[in-house]
Amino acid sequence: MTNEILHRLENGEITITKAFNLLNQTTVLDYTTKIYDNNENPNQLEELLAELDGLIGLKKVKKLIHEYRAFIEIQKRRQHVGLKTEPLVMHMIFKGNPGTGKTTVARILSKILKELGVLEKGHMIEAERADLVGEYIGHTAQKTRKMIQKALGGVLFIDEAYSLARGGERDFGKEAIDTMVKALEDYKNSLVIILAGYPKEMDEFLITNPGLKSRFPLQLNFEDYTLKELIAIGEKLALDRDYKFTLEAKTYLYQLLLTLQAKGELESGNARTVRNIIERAIRSQAVRLLNQEEYRREELMYLKREDLEKGVEECQDV
C-alpha cells in the first residue's frame, strides 16, 4: 500500500498532504492488504462463505457476517481511492447456549478474516478460564500473555468468558481481563478476540466490566435451534458418515427432542445433544450387526430406532 501511495504522488494524482495522511493511517486494512493480495487460492473466500451458508440455521449470524465482509471490502476500496475509512475493530461477543454453533462459526470466521486481509494466519486458539488464570500473583498475566502469543495472526476464542469475573476483586480472573484489554491495544493489527458464553451471563459480564463493551462492538446472538433444524442437523451428521435414518428412527428422534424441549432440557445441549445421540447410535448399530454373517450395503448404512434408543441410554447428556 505504501508503494502505491508514493506512485500516485509521483504521478500527480494526489497532493503531498493527501499522501502524508494516507501513509499515517494505521488501520488493519493497511497492515493486511499485501497478505490478501498474495492469496494463493482466489476462490478460498467464496468457499468459506459457502461453508458458512451451508450450516443449518443461524440465519441472523450469517447475515451479520456477510455484512461485516461487505464492510471490510468496501473500506478497502475507499482506502484505495483515497477516501476516509472507518476504524476496523473486529473483536466480538458470541452469546448463545451450548451447541448452538459458536465454536464452529468462530473457526470458519477466523479463516474468512484471513482471506479478507484482516488476519495474517487465520488460525484459532481456544481458551477457557483454566488456560488464563494462574494460582499466584503474576502467574495469570504470564498465562494469559502466553495464550495471546499463540493466537497472534488469528483468533483467540475464550469460552465461558464470564467466569473470569466471578471471583470478586481478589480473584486472579480480573488480572486476566486486564491483560487481555492491554493486548487489544498492543496487538490491534494482528489479533481478534472472541468472548463467548451463555446470553444472560455474558450480559452480566459486560455490565460488571463496562470498559469491555466498547472494545467488543460486534455482538452475535446464537439462537437455540428449532426441532426441524435439529432433525436436519442429525440427518446431516449421519449422512456425512454415510449413514441414514429409517423412517421409524427419524420419528423417534423427533419425539425424543420434543420431549426434551418440553422438559426445558434441550437448550443445554442443542446440536451437541443430537451429535452425542448419533455417535452412540452408530456404535450401537455396529454391535447389532457384528455377529451377522451376511449383510447388504443398506444394512450397514441405516440406523434403526433400536440403535437410537440404545444410544440415548448411553448418552449421559440426555
Image: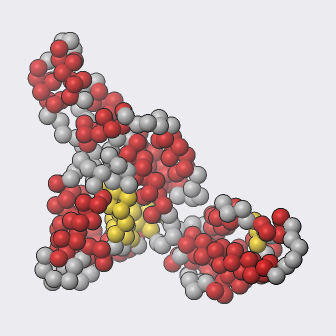
Colour option used: secondary structure
Q: Which residue of the protein is positioned furthest toward the front in this rendering? A: 293
Percent position (x, y) of residue 270? 55, 72
**Looking at the image, is 23 positioned above or below residue 212?**
above
**Residue 209 is at least partly visible in this image:** no
Q: What residue sits 22% from the left and 51% below the top?
A: 188
User: Dividing the image into 4 quarters, which one contains the N terminus?
Assistant: top left
Percent position (x, y) of residue 243? 73, 65
Q: What residue sits 17% from the left and 17% below the top?
A: 9
Percent position (x, y) of residue 298? 83, 65
Q: How many marks?
A: 0
Camera-side residue of 198 and 280: 280
Q: Quadrant of the rendered structure where residue 129 is?
A: bottom left
Please give left or right for residue 105 compared with residue 53 in the image: left
**Looking at the image, is 217 positioned above or below residue 226?**
above
Percent position (x, y) of residue 253? 71, 75
Q: What residue sits 74% from the left and 77% below the top?
A: 286
Q: What residue sits 17% from the left and 76% below the top?
A: 139
Q: Which residue of the protein is positioned furthest toward the right in this rendering? A: 294
**Looking at the image, is 23 positioned above or below residue 66?**
above
Please give left or right for residue 9 compared with residue 284 in the image: left
User: Dividing the image into 4 quarters, which one contains the C terminus?
Assistant: bottom right
Q: Quadrant of the rendered structure where residue 12 is?
A: top left
**Looking at the image, is 113 positioned above or below residue 293?**
above
**Residue 122 is at least partly visible in this image:** yes
Q: Which residue of the protein is positioned furthest toward the top in this rendering? A: 11
